[in-house]
């Protein structure tokens, strides 16, 4: 579970890097990279959320509290990726002059 959360965090970090590179280079191809990375993050979020909810349902006490904190962590990572995609779409609008269909 720890490795999967770290992997999700790394994907969010990559998404932020891609988006900032997109902004700095005005490279339109980077927009598709942001959408692909976002899909990976959404998948990881959904998988981890269900896995942790299942574990919380089976346990109580301190471990349940730790699991709830992990749920909050992956929810925050997913929210960061959502905001990053919105930023990428705004950058696309600045560069191209038209708005893509919302991905979120």
Image (cartoon, rainbow, N blue to C red):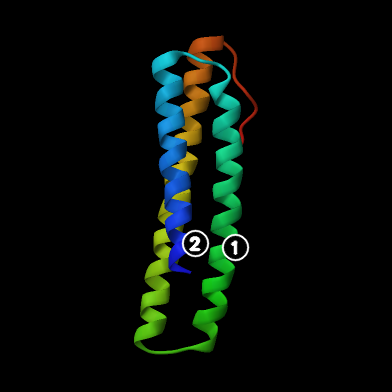
> Would you call the spot at circle 1 few (<14 residues within 10 Å), some (14-19), or many (20 or more)?
few
Q: Residue at the location (62% across, 23% down)?
A: 100
| Secondary structure category for the residue under label 1 | helix
Q: Position of residue 29 (x, y in %)?
A: 58, 19
Give the CA separation, mark 1 to mark 2: 10 Å
| Secondary structure category for the residue under label 2 | helix
User: Mark 1 near mark 2, Cβ–Cβ under 8 Å?
Assistant: yes
Q: Measured along the vertical axis of the image, is residue 101 above or below residue 70? A: above
Q: Position of residue 85 (x, y in %)?
A: 50, 34
Residue most toward the right?
A: 101
- The answer to whether 16 appears left or right of 100 in the picture is left
Q: How many marks?
A: 2
Question: In front of the other: label 1 or label 2?
Answer: 2
Q: Position of residue 70 (x, y in %)?
A: 41, 67
Q: Measured along the vertical axis of the image, is residue 104 above or below residue 20? A: below
Q: Nearer the viewer, residue 83 or 8?
A: 8
Q: Nearer the viewer, residue 99 or 28?
A: 28
Q: Which mark is residue 102?
A: none
Residue most toward the front?
A: 3
Q: Residue at the location (41% across, 33% down)?
A: 17
Quarter of the image containing the C terminus? Answer: top right
Upstream in sequence: badge 1 or badge 2: 2
Q: Position of residue 93 (x, y in %)?
A: 53, 16
> Would you call the spot at circle 2 few (<14 residues within 10 Å), some (14-19), or many (20 or more)?
few
Q: Residue at the location (57% across, 72% down)?
A: 51
Q: Which residue is mark 1?
A: 47
Q: Nearer the viewer, residue 90 or 63?
A: 63
- The answer to whether 72 appears left or right of 39 in the picture is left
Residue most toward the left?
A: 62
Q: Which residue is mark 2?
A: 4
- The answer to whether 36 appears left or right of 26 in the picture is right
Q: Residue at the location (54% across, 48% down)?
A: 41
């Amino acid at each position: 579970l720890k490795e999967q959360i770290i992997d999700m965090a790394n994907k969010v970090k990559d998404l932020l890097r891609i988006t900032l590179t997109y902004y700095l280079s005005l490279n339109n191809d980077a927009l598709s990279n942001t959408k692909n990375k976002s899909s990976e993050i959404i998948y990881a979020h959904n998988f981890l959320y269900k896995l942790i909810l299942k574990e919380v349902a089976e346990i109580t006490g301190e471990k349940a509290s730790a699991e709830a904190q992990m749920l909050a962590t992956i929810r925050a990572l997913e929210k960061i990726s959502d905001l990053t995609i919105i930023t990428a779409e705004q950058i696309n609008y600045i560069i191209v002059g038209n708005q893509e269909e919302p991905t979120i």
